[in-house]
Each structure stands twice: as C-alpha cells, then as structure tokens.
Amino acid sequence: MALAFALDVGFSYRDRRLDVAALEARLARTAPARVAESAEGPRTRFGPEDLTLARETLRRLSLPWEELFAALESARSDRVALLAIEPDAESGAVSISGEARDYLAALTYAERLAQAKGLRNVHLLRHEIRRDASQRTVTFTVSANWRRES
C-alpha cells in the first residue's frame, strides 16, 4: 500500500511540474508583449473635458485655503460654535454659519472676522434667537469674500 501511495504522489508531482513548465513557457511568450506595452505607456486617451476637470482641480487646490482657515482661527471664541463653512472657490465668497450664546457674541465674532487678514466685505446676513428649553442661543450666518493678500 505504501508503494502505491508513493507512486501516486510521484505521478502527481510529475503532472504538476509539467503544468508549471507549460505555464512558464506561456508566460515567456507573453512577457515581451507586456514589456513593449508598458514602454508605450497607458493607452488611455484623455479628452478635452478631462483636461478641463484637471485644470479646475488645480485651480481649486491653488486657492489661499490657509488664509481662510487662519482668519477663522484668529476670530474663534469660546462663546461661538461654527456649524458650517461653505466656501465658493469660483467667486471667492464664503458663508459661515454658527451658533452663539447670545447676540453680542455673534456680533463680536462677525467683527473679529472683519478684522481678520484675508477676509473682506464681512456681513452678518441673518440671525435668529432660538429659545431652547434650557438656554437662549443665537444662530447666525456671516458672509465674506476671501482673497490672497499681496
């Protein structure tokens, strides 16, 4: 029985070696074609819309984002929580929504934004006093233009 098992293992090994040799030969035949294909580069063609999208992405990445975030950081207050920052990269405008403990805190925050380097035309667009169960808070929206300082 051991002899039969050894012969079976031997034949299986020989079959697998033949399979490996056949696959290696097939790979050797296709490898030069793959090397030539990779030397040519990708065969994908880019259209005008792809180029436009790439330029738009590059333009957005080159905007003065650091100045906007620095202005927001310089105006921060413990009495104000920012809820949303919605920059419009196309026009350079930004809409800032927040919640303040009171109306004076909202006005003070808008004034700090107006004093911040990199922001201009800062306006308190709207405010609303919310009477929650435990406290009165003020939700507000400020608009501004942000630009690169020279």
Image (cartoon, rainbow, N blue to C red):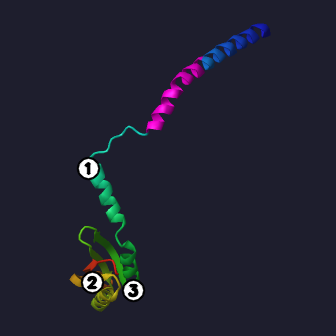
Q: Secondary structure at mark 1?
A: helix
Amino acid residing under circle 3:
Ser
Q: Nearer the viewer, mark 2 or mark 3?
A: 2
Q: Nearer the viewer, mark 2 or mark 1?
A: 1
Proximity of marks 2 and 3: CB atoms separated by less than 8 Å: no
Of residue 52 and residue 19, the one placed in the foreground of this image is 52
Indicate yes or no whether the magenta region holds residue 141: no
Quarter of the image where one finds residue 8: top right
Magenta residues: mostly which secondary structure?
helix
Indicate yes or no whether the magenta region holds residue 25: yes
Task: Say which residue appears at 51% left-offset and 32% top-offset.
Answer: 35
Amino acid residing under circle 1:
Glu
CA neighbours of label 1 inside 10 A, class few (<14), some (14 to 19), many (20+): few
121 left or right of 54?
left
Q: Which mark is residue 77?
A: 3
Q: Position of residue 25 (x, y in %)?
A: 58, 19
- Residue found at the very far left of the displayed protein: 125
Tell me which label, 3 or 1, sits earlier in the chain: 1
Amino acid residing under circle 2:
Arg
Part of the protein shown in magenta: 22-40
Of residue 4 and residue 101, the one placed in the foreground of this image is 4
Which residue was labeled with disc 1? 49
Quadrant the C terminus occupies: bottom left
Quarter of the image where one finds residue 144: bottom left
Quarter of the image where one finds residue 88: bottom left
Q: Which mark is residue 120?
A: 2
Quadrant the N terminus occupies: top right
Q: Secondary structure at mark 3?
A: loop
Q: Nearer the viewer, mark 3 or mark 1?
A: 1
Instruction: Estimate the spatial distance between the alpha carbons at disc 3 and disc 1, rounded to whole Å.
Output: 44 Å
53 left or right of 43?
left
Q: Position of residue 6 (x, y in %)?
A: 76, 12
